[in-house]
Image (cartoon, grey):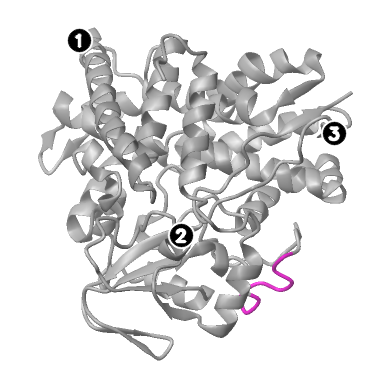
Amino acid sequence: MNSTTVDPLDQMVADYSLVTNGYSGTAPANIYPMLAEKRGKCPVMHGDLLLQNQIPSMADYMMTGRPTVTLFRYKDIHSVLMNPKDWLSYIVGDGFGAAVDNMLLTAMDGESHDKFRATLAKPFMRTEIRKLVDTLIRPVVMDEFVNKLRPNGKADLVRELALPFPIRAIYAYFGFPHDADLLANLASWAIQVVAAPQADPELAAITVPQSMVAGQSMYDTVMPIVQAYRARGEMRADILGHMMQVEHEGRKFTDDEITLFIRMLLLAAGETTTRSFANLMVQLLENPDVLEEVRADRTLIPKAISETMRRDPTAGAVARIAARDMEVGGVAIPKGTAVLLSIASANRDPDAYEDPDRLWLKRPMRPLLSFGFGPHMCMGMHMALAEMEVALDAMLDLPNLRFDPAYPHPEIRGLNMRGPDAIHVLWD
């Protein structure tokens, strides 16, 4: 598809659906009965849950025959994520890392990861992000999206809100110029990179080369933006301004290094928030009593977000590799074995969560795994949470918000990168 002849939003929706299709495979849309059965019968399973469902392996993307074990229990998965010394992350880059020159913070390990992350952390800290709520995030959500949708009385919340608004907000925080075509192209290229892994060889023959072109297009587009920002000489309180001023190991970043880092961030800058917000809205609309509970008490908005992310997370699985001979749940894991961690299963483990299938806002919470955990916890977490809080608050102001019966009921699907294809709603 050529983004110059297709509506940019339609292009984004098509690329988004390609990712969902790739990570759904033959798995049922409701994966939770299957996960409960595996968690109960074989919580430390030899084999790769994704490959068993014809989904690209995160543990052995290059199909080298690497031995793989899948974990399903909260306690086992939490212990792996909390031990980055013995469980390494470099295999995270196997899938689409090549399209971004393997510049992935999530695929770094040890001291290099810790130092690089510490250098870049300041603009992503909660204290910094909360400053943006009224100055950047709320104006974007309300002025550019919700206020325009409100008179219509209906919308597809995926296409008209969840896809574009997180991208618009984070791109503004990057320090990018406000150019709708620029933002749409960058967003589609980022999704095309994420869509590269496909279990179907014929489809992969298309998506992998496409991802390489998309990755280069992202670099070629971002580099002039970085150069123009530096030439202007005005360092603002945004991500580009931070990267141009901060020192890493005694020196400042070059334009090339900044461009590579920004390209890496673009891969997660919008779509994961899109899916998390979409999953949130589907679950609340399916549970109108809970929706009304939040509408009546807006202080529950953060709980609604964390509880829906627990109950149906976007990132349903992550992978690590054993740095030495290990043991999990009494099962020996030899050095070099990959472990696939089923976050979706852990989040519904009854040993960790009482009545785990229930959407319960007053639930006593334990550490949430949906943003990862430990040193590799998602660096953009606070931005994503702030964006979703503002957007949900705006949705709660739409009277009698409900599913549109003229369209199919939305279905959250995928063993990873879970999300619905569309959410058609009405309001009075």
| Spot occupied by residue 108 in the image (x, y as percentages of width and height) | 23, 54
Q: Nearer the viewer, residue 139 or 270?
A: 270
Q: Which residues are drawn in magenta?
A: 350-357
Residue 417: mark in rendering: none
Residue 405: mark in rendering: 3
Foreground label between 2 and 1? 2
Q: Nearer the viewer, residue 270 or 239?
A: 270
Identify residue type, mark 2.
Answer: Ala
Residue at 17% x, 32% y: name it.
257
User: Callout 2: helix, strand or loop?
Assistant: strand
The residue indicated by pointer 1 is: 231
- Residue 65 showing in the rendered view: yes
Residue at 24% x, 37% y: name it.
99
User: What predominant SS class does the magenta segment belong to?
Assistant: loop
Residue at 40% x, 68% y: name it.
48
Q: Residue 151 lies in magenta, yes or no? A: no
Residue 317: mark in rendering: 2
Lower position in the chain sequence, tag 2 or tag 3: 2
Lower position in the chain sequence, tag 3 or tag 1: 1
Q: In which quadrant will I find the N terminus? A: top left
How many other residues sit within 10 Å of disc 1, few (<14), some (14-19) or many (≥20)?
A: few
| 184 w.r.t. 293: above or below | above
